[in-house]
Image (cartoon, helix red, strand yellow):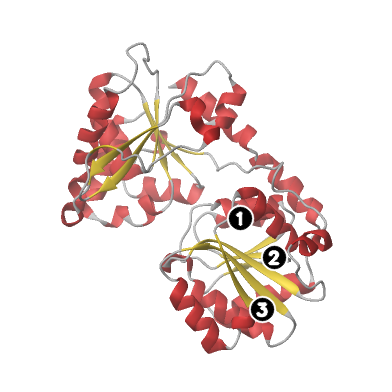
Amino acid sequence: MHALQQQDPGLNIRVQAFRSSFRHFGNASNQVHSRNEDACFHPEYFWTPYVPKLGGMNHRLFSFAFTRAQKSLPSDFVPQAVLVPWLFPDACGVALQTAAWGVPVVAIAQGSDVHQYLDMPFRRRAILAMSRRVKTIVTRSKDLENRLIQRGVSGDKVCTIYNGVDIHTFKPASRIAARGAFNLPQDERLLLFVGNFLPVKGLDLLLAACAQVMALQPVRLALIGGGPLEGALRTQAAELGISDKVHFLGRHPAPEVARWMQAADAVCLTSHNEGVPNVVLESLSSGRVPVCMDVGGIAEVVAPVVGKRFLVQQRDVAAYAAALLDVLQHPPDEAVLHLAARSYSWENCAKKYLELLRGA
């Protein structure tokens, strides 16, 4: 939204954020606050009912919440388009209302809403119906676009716009200086993970692979993020005998994540599936190689820069460890990586969205 506003300061953008809950419905509680930098978009927060056992019907509940939320808008605010990230229930619910409202909807497929929901009959049916109502579905990768088309979405309704990256924050810098800022030893290598500690991220494989690498040379692993698997990951690190080399850092704002990337030798991603995750673009923009499983749309942005050398084809600990050793011994030029990432800047991303929205 900020990139769109910078491209066209005359845009009048308002943000409504919905939070699904089994117990709450109506306006959000006072516990939900916007970031100070987002205040210009007058964000409002709403609870929407969510029934776990009837997941295939939740887009209708979301539609009801969306109808109530529209009453909060000023009477003189008449949108010309609605941008809705996440296909189900969000875009499916909004599309039920805006068809009668007469406002074009641009939906955004993020990843799991395609990878998982298209295999659920009720949700798939709702997504296909939504695709006929909206103006366009934007996907984060060509892989997601192809998956939607293969499952029945019309090809002329789908287009790919890759996520943006803040090339001014995520940029190459002295590794020595960055490590000094975190009091890290200069004579050891550093691997970095950034993300949620969830099963889909495959972090058990990452820890096992790092243990093999640590047995061969001095290496540390830093994990930025959090989630329900943290306890299990700490236990696994202890069982592997690498607890003293694995650092759980918690969550950090973007500037600090960028500094950790500058301190690292490589960024690790061992997910079972992905779209094109932001951390891959941030890693490239920081001049650090992302060592990833070859899943989803990751190869679409990594392979044109460094080929498939650091894209692991099978979920095998030894194969992933070999890729880590390769990048530690033969790192690509950081300036080349950053230059390639500049085409994914938020400025370029916003230009594509503006062209799409104006067409709508």
Q: Which quadrant is the C terminus positioned in?
A: top left
Relative to 335, say whether 316 is above or below.
below
Q: Which mark is residue 101?
A: none
Q: Residues within 10 Å of mark 3 (few under 14, many from 20)?
A: some
The local secondary structure at tag 1 comes to helix
Q: Which mark is residue 280?
A: 1
Is residue 14 in view from this perspective? yes
Q: Nearer the viewer, mark 3 or mark 1?
A: 1
The local secondary structure at tag 2 comes to strand
Q: Residue at label 3?
A: 322
Q: Amino acid at mark 3?
A: Ala
Which is nearer the eye, 321 or 131?
Answer: 321
Instruction: Name the quadrant containing residue 164.
Output: top right
Quote the CA–CA distance across marks 3 and 2: 13 Å
Q: Is residue 224 left or right of residue 263?
A: left
Instruction: Name the quadrant containing residue 176.
Output: bottom right
Q: Residue at label 2?
A: 266
State if disc 1 and disc 3 touch (CB < 8 Å): no
Q: What residue sits 66% from the left and 49% below the top?
A: 255
Quote the CA–CA distance across marks 3 and 1: 19 Å
Q: Is residue 221 left or right of residue 72?
A: right
